[in-house]
Image: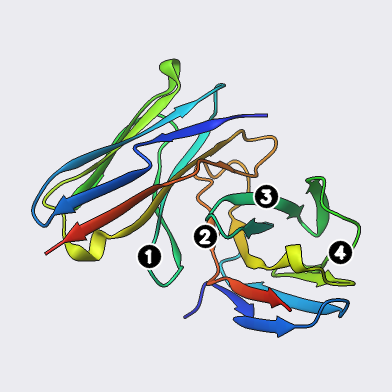
Amino acid sequence: DTAVSQTPKYLVTQMGNDKSIKCEQNLGHDTMYWYKQDSKKFLKIMFSYNNKELIINETVPNRFSPKSPDKAHLNLHINSLELGDSAVYFCASSPPLGTHRETQYFGPGTRLLVL
Amino acid sequence: GIQVEQSPPDLILQEGANSTLRCNFSDSVNNLQWFHQNPWGQLINLFYIPSGTKQNGRLSATTVATERYSLLYISSSQTTDSGVYFCAGGNTGRRALTFGSGTRLQVQP
């Protein structure tokens, strides 16, 4: 059973295109995240959703728009892709507050290459 | 925001050796986690350890919250331990993690 899944795993596209990445978790968690890992392996939070509500938006360009249709899904749409958007995008999820264990579980990542 | 500093940045070990990785935080955190990113890119959670000591097989971790640092111990290293080890911290209210820049470990046979 895949706990946190992402599609697609690889995405190669041209500058200026619009693309979406999908994430689903079957862990019953209520908080989901998008992280970006750059070419130097540095991981940085982009967005966080709790119970479908946006709670963190970390100075990410407006071209990036997350959407959470329900607690188990968090999608990321990117408009007008730029070369600098090339990176690995990780989705993650964590259990509800009060469980005394906020372990984050990561998906396999989506490797985006913008040409 | 919180700054996370990891050391050493790179580490090469012979199989069977032990090592200690360190993580310092610029501010207090009540959510501290260690991850291993394997050579295929998968991020695996090793420990959720805001304080105290935990052990899992050949790995153990200790966090001294009052002094804002955490240590990850790897004993009897194996080639499968190779990859990048990240520590990350945050606070309950914000929930997102701030990651360190990682320790790249290579275990040679």
Q: Which residue is mark 1?
A: B38
Q: Disc 3, disc 2: CB below 8 Å?
A: no
Q: Between residues B74 and B92, which one lies in front from this camera angle?
A: B74
In the image shown, does B28 or A50 lie closer to the viewer? B28
Q: Which mark is residue A45?
A: 3
**Tag 2 residue:** A105
Q: Amino acid at mark 4?
A: Ser
Residue B83 x %, y %: 34, 59
Query: How many circles with numbers are drawn on the protein?
Result: 4
Mark 1 in CB contact with mark 3 (< 8 angstroms): no
Is residue B45 in view from this perspective? yes
Q: Mark 2 or mark 4: which comes first in sequence?
A: 4
Q: Could you tell me how far apart the alpha carbons at marks 2 and 1 are, in whole angstroms? A: 15 Å
Report the amino acid beneath label 1.
Asn
The verdict on a common chain for dots 1 and 4 is: no
Residue A101 drawn at (x, y percent): 49, 45
